[in-house]
């Protein structure tokens, strides 16, 4: 830049597109600031307050974190992560074929399936879970039917790990299915046909064409379900009894029964950090931006 | 010229029905080994359906497809030794140019090294510098480059017959012409059988050894391009070949006819090739725009008719005139440049041998 072009004089008092954008974003920015950032900072700060206190204006301490590492909270964290991972994997297996059918085969029927599944979201999650309880409890719908029809005596089918996972799979199914449908829709039919025509078997077409091209949907669905189910609390409580304690229910008890807000805050902070790390690690493995940017032009 | 060669693909009485609608209706033809065969037809003529059956993506309702004598009706596309270049090209957007070309080799389990060598060769053959293109993403390639990648990928499959579903239709005219010639050269140098589908007869004429013209699921005419050009079987084929004049005539006695030209009825002399026709029969008289000329007073022509010039368009070396015989009846005339000064009134004439009688 030896013979630099003279810089044009700045236009005074004109609003560039940046300024307009910033102005339009103000309401949202304020909402996020007071509704999300501020409370989050409060929680983080509360984690450094002495245990069983209710004021933010004290000398910070690491006592809560020492408590967490000295006790068995890691078990709850592992349970939460494990249940969430299992939910994601099971949902992927269940939803991919359905998503494929909805995107490519059902045509008009896909709308019906969409409504049918979306309708289940109209009923509160807890009510649906209590429905399962009635189904699975001793002499419930399942046990009672088996006893009457087959003369088969079964004990309660509740309060075990499979039933917790069943509940989570059921509750979070729409969050996996709908992104997957969009993902599968992104795979052009002719590209699949071309691969088939070039000698690929059905399995090879799936592995080399369908899966990589629908990966954005797979990633979004998996992340959504993981983040939601890792903080799940009702499934383990309602269907699992106290068989399994998830980290979310640990945090809840600290804030309620134990009245130990600083410890609850510290647990929350730790868990948010952990989830963030897991999610960002997953995201870095798959270059989502690049995948989404590579949409075929056909 | 290649018709003597053994047929590689035989289509025998093939019909494809979708419900009550027959998209392809009792079609039969043979493609010879090493031939450039083209299926032409307007949209809805069933050419794409026919092609999809040939590559195995649809099954014929009745009839047989035979590849080298073997019936292949139920053979899935991935098991057929044929392959298709799609209209959309259907390149794999998540792979580089090199990986696209290598795909069929990879599927067959060829080693990394072999794949790369072959892809390198094919890219060179298609005038894509492998050093620049091998690692390029297909989405960053231009239209012409993508065509070449699709072609290289199809050739990597080493098919016995290569099918094309109008892959050039999305390109601009100049690039299309270049690629048409390259495609023809490629077919000659690889000695492969090409079967091309297009709606443009012009495109078919440039490249093909033989052309089949489809209308409403039926083959209207099949033959070498020159043959079809010289002797179109009916008005549809003639019209499909480009701008021609088709005159509605009613045969009268003694080699004459009456031309129903809009509000006028004009007596005409028919060409000797017409033969004996029943009086009162309705026919079309085909006259190519370049066979028409403006006659000066005293000049003799087979038929003459007074006209009014409506418009003239420059086509480069030639000029095209739209002339009106009577309200509601216009003709197209093509003459070399600077042959006449434009006056509104003129007399148009043509030699009898330059006109042809066709079924209406």
Image: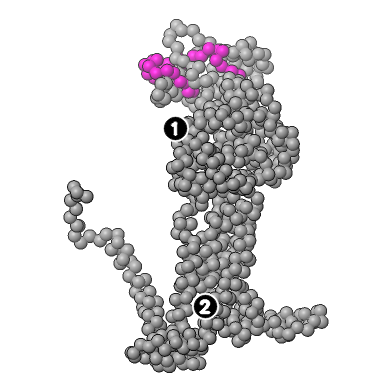
Quadrant containing the C terminus of chain B in the rendered view: top right
Residue A230: in magenta span: no
Residue carrying label 1: B174
Q: On the picture, is B60 further left or further right than B272?
A: right
Depth check, front residue: B1 or A274: A274
Q: On the picture, is A283 further left or further right than B273?
A: left
Q: Which mark is residue A231?
A: 2
Residue B335: in magenta span: yes
Give the residue drawn at x 18%, y 47%: A3
Q: Residue B312 sits in which quadrant?
A: top left
Quadrant containing the N terminus of chain B in the rendered view: top right
User: What segment carries the magenta color?
Assistant: B331-360
Depth check, front residue: B327 or B36: B36
Chain under numbered label 2:
A
One can see residue B305 in this view:
no
Give the residue drawn at x 56%, y 35%: B198
In x, y percent, where is residue B229? Answer: 57, 22
Give the residue drawn at x 51%, y 73%: A227
* A13 vs B30: above or below: below
* A195 vs B295: above or below: below
Q: How is the image coloured?
A: one colour
């Amino acid at each position: 830049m030896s013979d630099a072009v003279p810089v044009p004089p700045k236009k005074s008092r004109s609003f560039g597109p940046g300024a307009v954008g910033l102005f339009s974003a103000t309401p949202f920015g304020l909402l996020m600031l007071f509704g999300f950032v501020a409370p989050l900072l409060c929680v983080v700060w509360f984690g450094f307050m002495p245990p069983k206190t209710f004021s933010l204006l004290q000398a910070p301490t690491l006592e809560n974190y020492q408590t967490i590492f000295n006790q068995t909270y890691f078990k709850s964290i592992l349970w939460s992560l494990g249940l969430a991972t299992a939910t994601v994997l099971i949902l992927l297996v269940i939803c991919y074929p359905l998503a494929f059918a909805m995107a490519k085969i059902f045509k008009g029927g896909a709308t019906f399936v969409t409504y049918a599944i979306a309708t289940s979201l109209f009923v509160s999650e807890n009510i649906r879970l209590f429905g399962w309880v009635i189904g699975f409890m001793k002499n419930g719908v399942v046990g009672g039917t088996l006893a009457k029809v087959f003369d088969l005596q079964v004990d309660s089918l509740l309060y075990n790990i499979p039933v917790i996972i069943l509940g989570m799979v059921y509750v979070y199914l729409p969050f996996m299915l709908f992104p997957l449908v969009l993902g599968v829709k992104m795979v052009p039919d002719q590209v699949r046909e071309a691969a088939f025509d070039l000698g690929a078997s059905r399995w090879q077409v799936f592995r080399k064409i369908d899966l990589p091209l629908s990966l954005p949907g797979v990633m979004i669905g998996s992340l959504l379900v993981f983040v939601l189910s890792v903080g799940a609390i009702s499934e383990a409580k309602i269907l699992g009894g106290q068989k399994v304690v998830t980290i979310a229910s640990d945090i809840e008890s600290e804030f309620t029964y134990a009245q130990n807000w600083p410890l609850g805050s510290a647990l929350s902070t730790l868990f948010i950090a952990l989830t963030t790390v897991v999610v960002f690690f997953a995201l870095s493995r798959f270059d989502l931006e690049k995948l989404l940017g590579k949409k075929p032009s056909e | 010229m290649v018709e003597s060669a053994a047929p590689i693909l035989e289509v025998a009485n093939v019909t494809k029905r979708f419900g009550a609608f027959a998209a392809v209706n009792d079609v039969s033809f043979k493609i010879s080994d090493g031939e450039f065969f083209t299926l032409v037809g307007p949209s809805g003529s069933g050419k794409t359906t026919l092609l999809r059956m040939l590559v195995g993506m649809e099954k014929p309702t009745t009839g047989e497809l035979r590849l080298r004598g073997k019936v292949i009706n139920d053979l899935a596309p991935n098991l057929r030794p044929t392959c298709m270049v799609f209209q959309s090209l259907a390149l794999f957007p998540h792979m580089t140019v090199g990986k696209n070309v290598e795909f069929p080799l990879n599927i067959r389990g060829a080693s990394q090294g072999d794949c790369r060598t072959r892809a390198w060769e094919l890219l060179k053959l298609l005038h894509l510098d492998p050093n620049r293109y091998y690692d390029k993403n297909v989405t960053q390639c231009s239209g012409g480059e993508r065509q070449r990648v699709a072609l290289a990928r199809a050739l990597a499959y080493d098919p016995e017959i290569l099918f094309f579903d109008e892959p050039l239709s999305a390109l601009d005219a100049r690039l299309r012409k270049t690629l048409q010639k390259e495609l023809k050269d490629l077919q000659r140098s690889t000695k492969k059988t090409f079967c091309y589908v297009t709606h443009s007869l012009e495109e078919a004429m440039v490249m093909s050894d033989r052309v089949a013209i489809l209308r409403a699921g039926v083959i209207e005419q099949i033959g070498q391009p020159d043959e079809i050009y010289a002797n179109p079987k009916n008005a549809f084929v003639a019209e499909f070949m480009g701008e021609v004049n088709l005159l509605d005539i009613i045969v009268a006695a003694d080699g004459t006819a009456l031309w129903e030209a809009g509000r006028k009825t004009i007596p005409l002399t028919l060409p000797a090739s017409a033969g004996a026709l029943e009086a009162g029969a309705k026919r079309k008289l085909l006259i190519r725009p370049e066979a028409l000329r403006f006659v000066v007073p005293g000049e003799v022509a087979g038929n003459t008719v007074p006209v009014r010039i409506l418009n003239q368009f420059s086509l480069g070396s030639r000029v095209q005139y739209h002339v009106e015989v009577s309200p509601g009846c216009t003709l197209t005339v093509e003459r070399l440049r600077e042959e006449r000064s434009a006056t509104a009134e003129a007399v148009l004439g043509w030699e009898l041998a330059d006109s042809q009688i066709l079924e209406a």
